[in-house]
Image: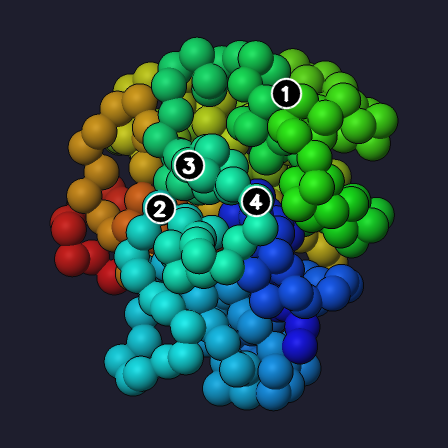
Amino acid sequence: MRIVTRPDFDGVVCAVLLMDALQIEPPVLWTQPSKMQHRQVAVKSGDVIANLPYHDQCSLWFDHHYSNQPDFPVRGAFKIAPSAAGIIYEYYRGKLDRNYAELVHQTDRIDSADLTMDEVLHPEAYPHVLLSMTLTNNDPEGTRYWEHLVDLLRTRSMDQVMNDQKVKERTGQVVSANIAYEKPLRANTTMVEHISVTDFRNLDPAPDGNRFLVYSLFPDCTVNVKIVHKDANLSSIQVGHSILKKGCEVNVGKMLASFEGGGHPGAGACRFPRKKAPEYLNRIIEILRKNEPESE
């Protein structure tokens, strides 16, 4: 039996809960939704998939993304919910050896972007928020760190986790990166009506930092679109409703399902060949500009 999930905070907490409930040993198979959608992941019988699109070879599946709703019975659980970890927690609560209530509560808030202004501007004061920012997809040594974090969250208190040497190194890097992120974010973001568009395609590597900062720097935006080149072949677009100013009516997950991606009503992402970037970006901006609830 093997856990298959994505390397974000929700995915890490999913792995923590599944390892505890089902006594699954590491390593975890970490992968991206786009690879699952394009059938590039070697899923096999016995695998437990969490926080990713469904694969018909798995034995259990847990997810919460609007764009992944099944129209057939599945083994496991699907629900539109703040996090996949919360679904697993409800499903296996009686089998867990530790009390993960606070960890799951914070995962719900972080994955659904249910944060306060102070958490957005000062994540270093909030351990769960800061810890979540240490998980990035473009990390060359990511697997080793993700596995380490799973082990810590299974066996240590949050204070002990945050005092771990590897975690302290990562959180220090995050704080520095967040400070440095503001300048390129301002320089490469423009407003298109109510949409803030962050275009990092000309920057290599693309800057990374506090994903919520754009909403405070551009307070008139109700939705942000960020485009980056992932490598020589792939580009990525992330879309998120502002957590500070309501008004975007577009279901992001539903919209991005038409662009080789998916997600939640309020946030999502897609990856695609670089040659499609201009077309996809223009189409997405036009859909968001019209701001119709059933836009696809």
Judge left or right: residue 29 versus residue 224. Answer: right
> Disc 3 to disc 1, how far (Cα)?
24 Å
Instruction: Decide: is 275 above or below 282.
Output: below
Residue drawn at (59%, 67%) of the image? 22
For marks 3 and 1, the one nearer the N-term is 3
According to the image, label 2 marks what residue? 82
According to the image, label 4 marks what residue? 98
According to the image, label 1 marks what residue? 178
Q: How many numbered markers are drawn?
A: 4
For marks 4 and 1, the one nearer the N-term is 4
Q: Quadrant of the C terminus?
A: bottom left
> Disc 3 to disc 4, how far (Cα)?
15 Å
> Disc 1 to disc 2, how far (Cα)?
25 Å
Marks 3,4: beta carbons within 8 A: no
* Closer to the eye: label 3 or 2: 3
Between 151 and 289, the residue placed more toward the observer is: 151
According to the image, label 3 marks what residue? 105
> Disc 3 to disc 2, how far (Cα)?
9 Å
Residue drawn at (55%, 77%) of the image? 38
Looking at numbered disc 1 in the image, what kind of residue is underneath it? Asn
